[in-house]
Image (cartoon, rainbow, N blue to C red):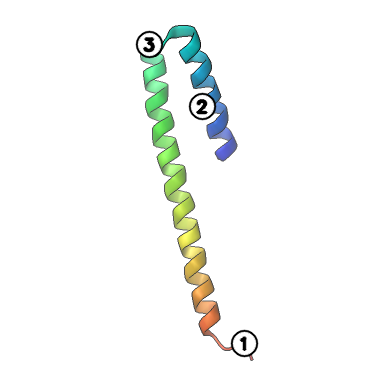
Amino acid sequence: MHRRLQDLQGLCEKLQARYGDDDDLVLQLKQALESLAANETRNHARAHHNRRKQDQTELSKPRH
């Protein structure tokens, strides 16, 4: 997902350079990218939180 987001940000920059910051398409794309970035950040944090919980429960169990 990270690579896809980077590709879309590159596209946004190209459209921005071509049509300007005030173009409706550029503004819509920026909003969509912000939403995708927020979702990716939230999913990444959730995955790491679950991993930490799993590690803690595994550490509390005896190994033998």
Q: Position of residue 23 (x, y in %)?
A: 38, 11
Gap in angstroms between the C-alphas marked 3 and 2? 16 Å
State which tag comes first along the sequence, 1 or 2: 2
Q: Which residue appears farthest toward the bottom when viewing the image?
A: 64
> Label 3 is placed on what type of residue?
Asp
Of marks 1 and 3, which one's residue comes earlier in the chain?
3
- Circles 3 and 2, Cβ within 8 Å, touching? The answer is no
Residue 23: numbered disc: 3
- The image shows residue 6, relative to residue 60, as above or below, that is above
Q: Amino acid at mark 2?
A: Gln
Q: Are marks 1 and 2 in contact (CB under 8 Å)?
A: no
Where, quadrant-wise, is the C terminus in this rendering? bottom right
Read off the residue under disc 2. 9
Label 1 neighbourhood size at 10 Å, few (<14), some (14-19), many (20+)?
A: few
Q: CA distance from mark 1 to mark 3?
A: 61 Å
Q: Residue at x 62, y 87 (%)?
A: 63
Say which element carries label 3.
Answer: loop
Alpha carbon distance from label 1 to label 2: 47 Å
Q: Are marks 1 and 3 in contact (CB under 8 Å)?
A: no
Task: Give the residue drawn at x 40%, y 15%.
Answer: 25
Graded by Cα atoms within 10 Å as few (under 14), some (14 to 19) or many (20 or more), the crowding at tag 3 reads few
Q: At numbered mark 2, what does the secondary structure look like: helix, strand or loop?
A: helix
Q: What residue type is disc 1 on?
A: Arg
Q: Earlier in the sequence, mark 3 or mark 2?
A: 2
Residue that carries the numbered disc 1 in the rendered image: 63
